[in-house]
Image (tube, rainbow, N blue to C red):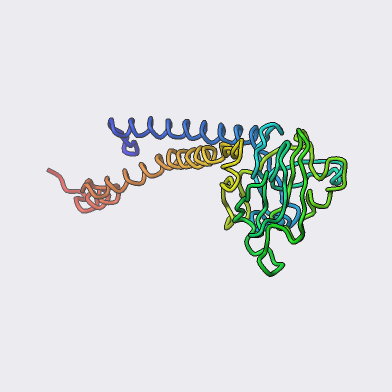
Amino acid sequence: MGGTIRTGGRGRLGSVLSGLAVAVGCVLFLGGFVWGALVYRPYTVPSESMHPTVTSGDRVLAERIDGSDVRRGDIVVFKDPAWGDMPMIKRVVGVDGDRIACCDAAGRLTVNGKPVTEPYLSRQGWGGKEAASPTGFSATVPDGHLFLLGDQRATSQDSRVHLQDPGKGAVPRSAVTARLDAVVWPLDGLAVIDRPQGFAALPGGVSQPGPVRPLAWALAGGAALVLAGAAYGPLARLFSRGGAGASGAPGPGARSAAQRTSGGARD
């Protein structure tokens, strides 16, 4: 009986709430993990062709999509035998029937005669006005195809080097397997990849980001709830001991001393 800790209504309520927090946290964390595994696929960026948006060695999350969902400005993962039949990552700048050309008098890429602002092309490294491409080109995208460029236009092996192929540099929409949504490694580069607004005014607009932000909140919130619920028991016991010591109730050591002092005294 001396070692029994009695809990009142608050203690019971705290235990119930801590258990509920752990349960909800597990549902959020595990559910978010499963949801993410179904929606996203991790990739390692293989080259510098998409620098500075993503860099060689970056770990990224790519949303599993169908090629019909691709819009201009998307960074996609695709595989085409004409490009080496291995997964590649490039940015879509033209879709079915578009006329792609570079460069206008201001050094910009044009889509159907309309110039596109591409802020992700900063510091390309070939000097001068640093136009959207160090070499001029033009192409019409076949129906059901996509025209793809790297963000590092000085070195990227993209649609420009395949202009003489049967697809005129474009790849079929069916070759696309995923669309990049976020950089997850290294941590100092952690970011959601925004859709470029330079393509937003063109017909079809730009795509909407996948559920990467809700997933991140679910995982973080679930982990926080699990930790908070698991910590309740140890913290409650710690504060209970502290409260008992401060209440003035004699502990076992005090009772022993009192008994020794009274010794063999009798009434």
Residue at image point 49% right, 40% down:
217
Quarter of the picture containing the N terminus is: top left
Residue 34 picture location, percent across and down? 61, 32
Residue 265 in the image: x percent, y percent? Answer: 16, 48
Q: Is residue 63 left or right of residue 78?
A: left
Q: Is residue 193 visible?
A: no
Whether residue 72 can be seen here: yes
Give the camera-side residue of 11 and 209.
209
Q: Name the residue at 77% across, 49% down.
A: 138
Rendered view: 59 above or below 3: below
Residue 74 on image: x %, y % = 65, 43
- The residue lying furthest to the left in this view is 267
- Quick one: 187 or 10, which is closer to the camera? 187
Q: Residue, x 63% and y 60% (percent of image)?
A: 106
Residue 58: x, y in percent?
A: 67, 53
Instruction: Decide if residue 154 is on the left or right side of residue 216.
Output: right
Q: Residue at x 78, y 37 (%)?
A: 142
Horizontal side of 149 relative to 203 (left or right) equals right
Count the labels in the image: 0
Relative to 26, is 192 above or below? below
Q: Quadrant of the C terminus?
A: top left
Residue 195: quarter of image: top right
State the residue in front, 37 or 229: 37
Near-viewer residue (97 or 259): 97
Q: Quadrant of residue 157?
A: bottom right
Q: Residue furthest bottom?
A: 127
